[in-house]
Image: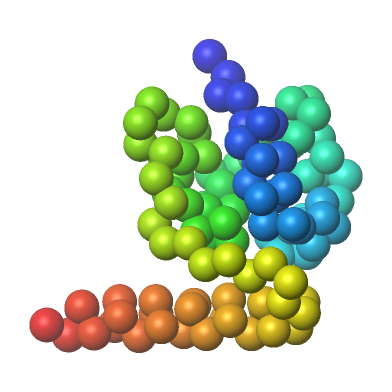
Amino acid sequence: MAVVFDDTIRSLRYSRRMTQAELANRLGITRTVISAYENGTRQPSHEVLIKMAGVFNVSLDYLYNYGNSQKVRHSLDLTGMERDHRILLEEMADIIRISESVTDCNK
């Protein structure tokens, strides 16, 4: 049974005011591949789904659309911010996540 990601990916992208090209760039794939995901003609690989979960800050369960497990870990409204500032904040969040995971490993 194939899992349908089209509505989930499109909704997440729209909610982040992100173009297909911007999402594709963040995932290291082409815009046409994003379009195929959103049209339901192609399924993302597990590796792409992991990257996508990171970009959208959601769990893999959310992407797979499993029941009530659709939970965003944290949300920050970046509406109206310049693109460069949004990218900077996302990169800072990545650094903090890495720092926390290293700290957890050292406990």
Residue 66 versus residue 24 in the image, above or below: above
Q: Nearer the viewer, residue 51 or 8?
A: 8
Residue 30 shown left or right of residue 43 in the figure:
right
Residue 3 seen by the camera: yes
Residue drawn at x 61%, y 36% as measured from the top left: 8
Q: Name the residue at the top extreme.
A: 1
Residue 10 versus residue 31 in the image, above or below: above
Please provide percent x and percent y for residue 26.
71, 65
Residue 103 versus residue 80 in the image, above or below: below
Q: Name the residue at the right extreme.
A: 32
Residue drawn at x 35%, y 36% as measured from the top left: 69
The quarter holding residue 90 reads bottom right
Task: Give the colour scheme of this rendering.
Answer: rainbow
Please provide percent x and percent y for residue 68.
35, 31
Q: Nearer the viewer, residue 82 or 93?
A: 82
Please provide percent x and percent y for residue 23.
74, 57
Residue drawn at x 17%, y 85% as measured from the top left: 106
Quarter of the image that includes the C terminus: bottom left
Residue 53 shown left or right of residue 18 in the figure:
left
